[in-house]
Amino acid sequence: MQLHPFSLERYFSRHEFNARYLLGSSDPESMPLAEVLALEPDARNRLENLWLGYTEYCGHPELREEIARLHTATAAEHVLVCTGAEEPIFAFMNVALARGDHFIAQWPGYQSHFEVARSIGAELSLWKGDPDDGWRYDVGELARLIRPDTKAILVSSPHNPTGFHFDAAAWTAIVELARAHGIWLVSDEVYRGLEYDPADRLPAVCDLYERGVSINGLAKAYALAGLRIGWLATHDRELFARIGAFKDYLTICNPAPSELLATIAVRHSAQLWERSCARLRENLALLDAFLARHADRFRWTRPRAGTMAFVRTLDGKATELSETLLRELSVMLVPSPHFECGDAHLRFGFGRANFAEVLGMVDHHLTK
């Protein structure tokens, strides 16, 4: 296996803790430990008296039960707790795919969604969104990409970086396509819960399809990236066992303090999701007004869910603008080359508490 450098993460490694202001981050405003502990009256005592030995490789039973309660047709036995969402993505690819297998992934997308498969030697087809139609993904085009040797399809909704969110009809059609061909359907659901209207929330893929694989975690919808807890859920018992065995060569098990805090967080999912959504709705209105004022520079499709928008620069010079903002304002946006997607788009993240302040700085700079 020869993995290419993860362009987005290398970009963050250079700027995330050096730039003074982050305007391209995909995670909402996080919270201090004290706020998590305040969710339950005995939480602090449980943390202080926690035994710091090895944990169960599948995850603490209580945490798996709480995750299962987020689902309609998935039990704790179908849940494998991992270190972040990146670990189950990496593990699935290595277990399910071999050199020469055919794999389909949404594009543009998070690089590990296709780079790991590519590095294994799988034949990759990109299911491309239409930037002129709100980044819509044509299910008919997905059907045309499927081949007799297709092993898996990877989807994500709400989507990073475009902010696109499937409607219920398209979601059902994707599941039925996968079922008709008997292939795995992997769904990165880390932004599930951040629908501005809860009526837009889609069912988890693992609840809909016997070969569905749902991947989720605490970094995005829960705004608890520092806990480094994610999970995979599937009814495919053989796949589950193989991924669990592969995990023995990765993290083996998860940090006990993180699992305890994750259990508390997942038990209060609705509260934590709404905490982030309230800020997202408020900040999205500010971004709406900002882009209207600068309609001579930008075009966009307003998202219905998630933490980000993929905004088109009309001059096609996203990298140049992002470098200028870094140099002159110490503001970090993410230009589209880091998603292997030309140089005409910028990822705006609008989940942070200082969004109004930072956007105001950029507004003043562009107006000046």
Image (cartoon, helix red, strand yellow):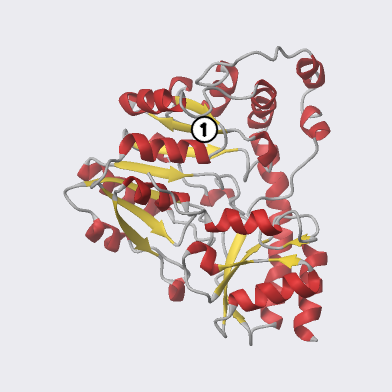
| Residue at (50% x, 54% y) in the render | 5
Q: Quadrant of residue 108?
A: bottom left
User: Could you say where residue 122 lies in the image, as x and y percent from the top left?
Assistant: 29, 49
Q: Which residue is mark 1?
A: 231
Confirm whether residue 305 shows in the render: no
Q: Which image quadrant: the N terminus?
A: top left
Classify 116 as above or below 165.
Answer: above
Q: Which image quadrant: the C terminus?
A: bottom right
Classify 4 as above or below 237.
Answer: below
Q: Nearer the viewer, residue 59 or 187?
A: 59
| Residue at (62% x, 44% y) in the render | 221
Classify 30 as above or below 355.
Answer: above
User: Could you say where residue 149 lies in the image, as x and y percent from the top left?
Assistant: 19, 47
Q: Quadrant of residue 280?
A: bottom right
Q: Amino acid at mark 1?
A: Trp
| Residue at (34% x, 60% y) in the render | 126
User: Could you say where residue 113 lies in the image, as x and y percent from the top left?
Assistant: 43, 50
Q: Quadrant of residue 39?
A: top right
SS at mark 1 in the image? strand
Left or right: where 334 falls relative to 360? left
Left or right: where 309 falls relative to 240? right
Q: Nearer the viewer, residue 217 or 149?
A: 149
